[in-house]
Image (tube, grey):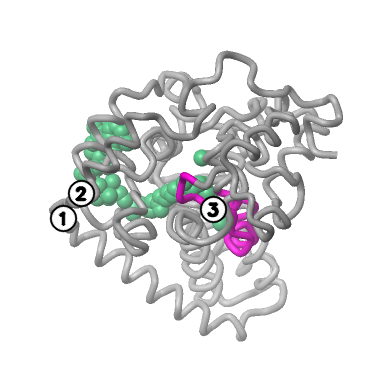
Amino acid sequence: PRAGEDGHAQVVPDGPVAPEDSLGLTPEVVDQRAVEESERPALTIVWKNVVLMSALHIGALYGLWLLPQASWKTMIFCFVLYEFNAIGITAGAHRLWSHRSYKARLPLRIFLAMCDSMAFQNDVIEWARDHRVHHKYSETHADPHNAKRGFFFAHVGWLLVRKHPEVKNKGKLLDISDLLADPVLRLQRKIYVPSVILMCFVMPTVVPWYFWGESAFISYFVCALFRYSAALNATWLVNSAAHMWGWKPYDVRISPSENPVVALLAAGEGFHNYHHTFPHDYSTNEFGWILNLSTVFIDVCALLGLAYDRKAMPKHFIESRRAKTGDKRPLAKKLS
Ligand code: ST9
Ligand code: ZN
Ligand code: ZN
């Protein structure tokens, strides 16, 4: 059973529900979107990022081309790394640290921070600050990857240009004291560069070479560059594809959508209409383990006593919200 129905999980809301949580849209955000409709913000391109991102993707495509020459052990290792890379972002940076949707004991937090360094998506404090501002000011200029600015901007373009001043202005109003108070996150920030070199590039290259004699050249291009870039693109699809295409069974008024393909690629993070409607649910969906490896991971950690206080939306709460704001057309209903 999904946590929340088996009596083990804490059920949200456990405090007063903020207006943006109960309605999905604050009047402030709606007004802001209307004002911005006709604006086209100026872009300041960061050429260093353009060059590095292009080089990474060329290296990753070369890794994909080399993949058939890799041993089956290397292929399995690459897949396992991809999933742990994903878990670092989903169960770590996203569900634990950005949304506090469950609690984790120290060994699990250390493990998740290591996986997060393997994912090399900025340190958790920066990632979570950007993500909190993405939820609170979704699809306005204060949203770092505002999907109203098109697929490319939401996918990768936002990492290639200076941020809109509103991201910084609104971001500074957010409380991130909980992130700064976590010693694991402070340590990760302090040793971020060496931790990324080790976890994202050196370890994926050395393990196949040392343990089963893979060529270090192949393991670098396949397990480091190809795995890293594939996981980046899967993550970015949540910001681009899942903000554009899919079903809206919980709230028709927002762009984030239920996108099963993205859910599969992103270890359970494609149920984005649900997630933007109920951001504090630790499962980011209504269906528990279906297409959701990250929920499986958190539930197993809970069984081992490493994770606790998983927050899940009560069924009646979901139903009443669906009745108020959800898409009630037959297909959306069938898929919800
Ligand atoms: C990457 C991140 O890929 C991907 C995140 C995706 C999120 C997805 C979410 C979806 C849900 C979860 C799905 C998970 C699925 C996982 C599946 C896995 C298979 N608030 O940034 P700077 C201020 S990273 C408040 O330099 P610029 C602040 O004072 C990839 N203040 O801005 C800051 O200083 P500090 C690898 C803020 O100059 C100062 O501004 N990494 C905020 O405009 C300067 O900040 C890269 O490619 C805020 N939110 O530059 C690096 N933001 O930090 C990319 C900023 O000291 N980044 N401030 O406080 C950069 O190079 C730059 O950030 C930039 C903007 C060029 C993009
Ligand atoms: Zn989103
Ligand atoms: Zn989120």
What are the residue bounds of the magenta stretch?
Answer: 253-272
Residue 79 quadrant: bottom right
**Viewer-nearest of discs 3 and 2:** 3
Q: Which labelled disc corresponds to residue 274?
A: none
The crowding category of the residue bearing disc 1, from other C-alpha atoms within 10 Å (few below 14, some 14 to 19, many at least 20), is: few
Three-letter code for the amino acid on which mark 3 is drawn: Ser
Whether 261 is among the magenta residues is yes
Q: Is there any visible trace of residue 86 in the rendered image?
A: no
- Residue 287: where, in percent of width, then height? 75, 46
Q: Is residue 109 above or below residue 221?
A: above
User: Label 3, on which residue?
Assistant: 257
Labels in figure, total: 3
**Viewer-nearest of discs 2 and 1:** 1
User: Label 1, on which residue?
Assistant: 43
Ligand 1, by image quadrant, is top left
**Viewer-nearest of discs 1 and 3:** 3
User: Label 2, on which residue?
Assistant: 162
- How far is mark 2 from mark 1, CA to CA? 7 Å
Classify residue 271 as left or right of residue 335: left
Q: Is there any visible trace of residue 20 in the rendered image?
A: yes
Three-letter code for the amino acid on which mark 1 is drawn: Leu
Query: Which residue is painted at 23% across and 30% down in the image?
Result: 169
Query: Which residue is painted at 37% across and 63% down in the image?
Result: 151
Q: Residue furthest top?
A: 15
Question: For numbered disc 2, what is the local secondary structure?
Answer: loop
Q: Nearer the viewer, residue 174 or 20?
A: 20
Residue 135 quadrant: top left
Assess mark 2: CB under 8 A from ligand 1?
yes
- Residue 154: where, in percent of width, then height? 36, 56
Query: Which residue is painted at 40% across and 30% down in the image?
Result: 26
Q: Is residue 141 above or below residue 215?
A: above
